[in-house]
Image: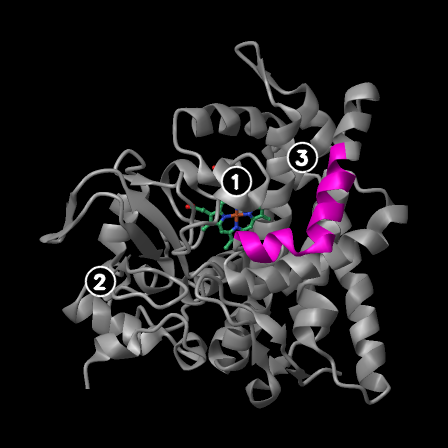
Amino acid sequence: MQMTEVYDPFDPAFQADPYPAYAWLREHDPVHHHAGTSIAPSFWALTRFDDVWDAVRRPEDFSSASGLTFYRDEIGQLGLAPTIVMLDPPIQTQLRGLIGRGFTPKRIAALEGDIRRFARERLAEVAEKAAAGEIVDLHQDYSTTIPTYVLASLLGVPAADRARFDPWVSTLTALQESGFSSAALAGAEAVTEMFEYFAALIQDRREHPTDDLVGALVNAEVDGQRLSDWDILGFCFVMVAGGNDTTGSLISHSVMLLGADPDQRSLLLEDPSLIGNAAMECLRLESSVQALARTTTRDVTVAGTTIPKGEKVLMLFGSANRDEKEFGATADRLDVRRLIPRQLGFSSGPHFCVGNHLARLQATVALQELLAAQPQIGVDLTAAQRHQSAFTRGWITLPATGVQ
Ligand code: HEM
């Protein structure tokens, strides 16, 4: 059997465990050409760490401006100006500088106490649920609640509007299964409602300056340049679409990996200061963003194979992050003490995740509190259900075990 036939990112069986196919591709076909399907034309896939690392850092050859999936129409019909993640330098660089003015390490660090308090409240509910004999869904009852709460607070969504915010997030999470195709987005009322809501919020912040992130973005200025309403709206969209389920999945995957490896879990229980590094190790092993595309701007040769101009090329972060050439013979194994000077869980280069500090803080606090309250927690994979997505790796439901 040709393993290349097994590499089918649309196949739920592949999505359930993509790692054997990735390993085969890295070894035998590192610059893989996929013939495509009726819903997605042909594309290429880079699977080795060095090749992906190099490509994402060369936006002049591997552009983001034609979208991040292998669907070809994803930008045109969105009805939204391209967001930061779908722009190339130099425009993207300018936007990023402005966004950095609002998204400061200080603003992120200030959230820690609030995240911890919120996590403890959720854990009290989790314990009550278990005491009442109900099944605890780790993903829905705990992991995803944290990023949704944090993002709503960060964006300055008032508590009274929180009930509206949650369905927008779940709609966007569900839409990721379509790779955010324009048709799916256009059909989603929740998305239109979210845009309208944020447009009004931005307008309000222009009239009444505030200290929250949207208030800071409205006032951000670099070399006399300011962000337009569209820029801020696009940024809110990328944060809600890209910062929620990714973070929730990281927390859930970390519990899954620790549950399967009691020795590694013991290390964290003995020394909780390792938890921050452990979260990054879990992101490496189970990358929430498995793959995103670029489009070649000219004929480009990678590892001896020439990819013609105008082709979609998938950056398989999930494969690169398990490359033995980068991470050694134990690349497939959890090692909470591993030194990780670089990885691709947050990409690299100009689009390196703006929210990486926030994601790491949330995962660290969520795991610290969880392990302190529920040291024996694990997951029941037989009753779990994954999202079907060629691009992200996450859960719909993940029942917990060992909750007291
Ligand atoms: C574990 C959680 C997260 C993961 C795995 C993740 C992953 C990523 C990846 C892979 C990219 C790069 C896209 C590319 O190369 O084309 C990215 C970009 C981005 N992320 Fe995250 N992200 C996470 C959390 C967050 C959070 C919490 C936020 C904000 C609240 C956020 C905001 C963004 C933004 C705005 C970009 C676009 C940056 C740009 O294009 O310059 N992310 N993220």
User: In the rendered view of the protein, which quadrant contains the N terminus?
Assistant: bottom left
Q: Identify residue for label 2.
A: 33
Q: Amino acid under label 2?
A: His
* Residue 120 position in % (x across, y down): 78, 62
What residue type is disc 1 on?
Val
| Mark toward the viewer: 2 or 3 | 2
Residue drawn at (51%, 36%), measured in percent from left and top?
Answer: 82
Measure the alpha-carbon separation of dots 2 and 3: 43 Å
Q: Give, as a single range, the part of the protein colored magenta.
A: 182-199
- Disc 1 target residue: 354
Find residue 55 and report its image quarter: top left
What is the magenta segment's predominant secondary structure? Answer: helix
Label 3 SS: helix
Disc 1 element: loop
In which quadrant is the C terminus drawn? Answer: bottom right
Residue shown at the point (85%, 42%) measured from the top left: 158
Of circles 3 and 1, which is in front? 1
Mark 3 residue type: Arg
Q: Which of the two discs, 2 and 3, labels the residue nearer the N terminus?
A: 2
Q: Is residue 260 left or right of residue 9?
A: right
Q: Residue at x 39, y 24 (%)?
A: 90
Q: Which mark is residue 106?
A: none
- Mark 1 residue CB less than 8 A from any atom of ligand 1: yes
**Left or right of 323, for residue 360:** right
Mark 3, residues whose alpha carbon is within 10 Å: few (<14), some, or many (≥20)? some
Camera-side mark, 2 or 1: 2
Marks 3,1: beta carbons within 8 A? no
Q: Which residue is under mark 3? A: 107
Crowd rating for badge 2 (residues with CA inside 10 Å; few <14, some 14–19, many 20+)? some
Q: Is residue 246 above or below residue 393?
A: above
State the residue in front, 82 or 399. Answer: 82
